[in-house]
Amino acid sequence: MNWKTFITLAMSTVLPGIHLAVSCQDNENEPNSISCEIPPNSNRYCELWATMDSVHQGIGGELSILHVGGSHVQAGWIGHFMREQLALWSPQAIWSKGLMLPYRLAKTNTPTHFRTEMSGSWQGSRCTRKTWDEINSDVGSGTGIQVRTDSPASTLQHVAFLPDSSKFSANTFDIWTNARPSEISFFNAGSDANMTPLIDQSGWRIVLSTPVDTFRLSLQSASDRSIPIAYEGAYSQISTAAPRMTYNEWGHNGLHIRDMRKCVGLQKLVKRMQPDLVIIGIGLNDAIDKHGFDIGQFSADYGVLMRQLEKRLPNAAFLLLSNTHVHPTNETTAKHSNEIKAFLRAHAESTGCGFFDLGAAIGGNESTADWMSNDWMKSDGIHFHSSGYQRIAGLLYDAIHQAFQHHLSCENPTEK
């Protein structure tokens, strides 16, 4: 038996959101099919499958997924449609918003599952920008984003939004900020708040007496403050015996593998989230870099990242994604992406990670013209409209779900 468990997946040729599983066919009218490569007898994946089974059966536990990447992840649509699929798969599960980053306060696009409102004057930067190196009030949260305010009084709130705000609530919030307790007010009607310092002194934990779906802070600078108040995001959880799920998106536009080194505290952050599955889709921005790409350096940086993550997450399963394609197909970018794909597949095989050839799943380089004509891909030839991200999320969900179903069928061969 090959080291990989081959799960047959199909790229649907029907309406977005409908996905067919078929065997490989020579008929050109059949959907393209690929394999999701999962190492057999993996303790990490066995733990993931056990958690999924518990949540699906309504027994209890939490399924936590972390998706790491660039603009495809920050856009939020992949996570949005993954939540929709997972909610259909386990409708009884309770959701936490999980990681909420201050994208809008930093004047960049916000994912769909929460919306952010604010008052006061805010400025910010992300780990993908040169200005990140100039920040002198780093809280060290590992979120890769920081916003600052000089306003005497400022407010911010993150509100649960899509797909169903009634299912997104929390009673515990970790906030990463250099603000003092006397500078922080937490407002939520009908719920008392208890605030204690985080163990690493990077901020505060706010515990409420009852769950809420809106997180609202008021920050008022003390008269003796010499540097701006900084805020790097929040993490929400809900305490319940019911089965629950969290889909966290750690994504920043323009992310390169080298940018991961700038995120002081990232290892603590992932340990805080305790994901059962980590999906990593980093490499497209590196491949587009025509003059600075070096597969040797990319491999070294990727290896550092993976060792750091695996050290902090010894029980988590990892799924590595190849790059999506650009339109029109660029020979240099395609060459770099192929080098990255070869490295990721080899790295997955040698370290026991899963690998999913997302680029092949959506049809390869030759499919980009169709994606453009169907209005699934944006005019920049790199990013996608929501309908395109829906198809990508469907393929990713199918890769995970069908591997899970394959595991169940092997564990219980008499069950259909």
Image: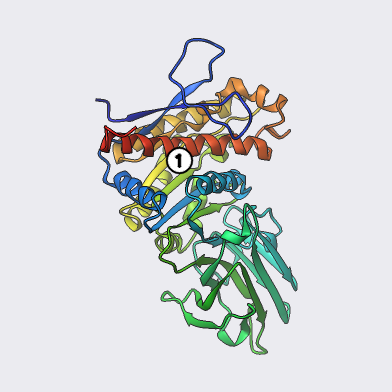
For residue 304, above or below residue 196: above
Q: Is residue 294 visible?
A: no
Q: Position of residue 8 (x, y in %)?
A: 42, 26
For residue 163, above or below residue 214: above
**Quarter of the image that includes the C terminus:** top left
Comparing 111 with 302, the one in front is 111
Comparing 232 with 394, the one in front is 394
Asked which quadrant contains residue 372, the reply is: top right
Asked which quadrant contains residue 350, the reply is: top left
**Residue lying furthest top in this view?**
27
* Amino acid on which the number 1 mark rests in the picture: Phe
Q: Position of residue 2 (x, y in %)?
A: 27, 26
Comparing 107 with 213, the one in front is 213
Q: How is the image coloured?
A: rainbow
Q: Residue at x 63, y 47 (%)?
A: 75
**Quarter of the image that includes the N terminus:** top left
Q: Crowding at label 1, few (<14), some or many (≥20) Cα neighbours within 10 Å? A: some
Left or right, 342 with respect to 195, comes to left
Residue that carries the numbered disc 1 in the rendered image: 298
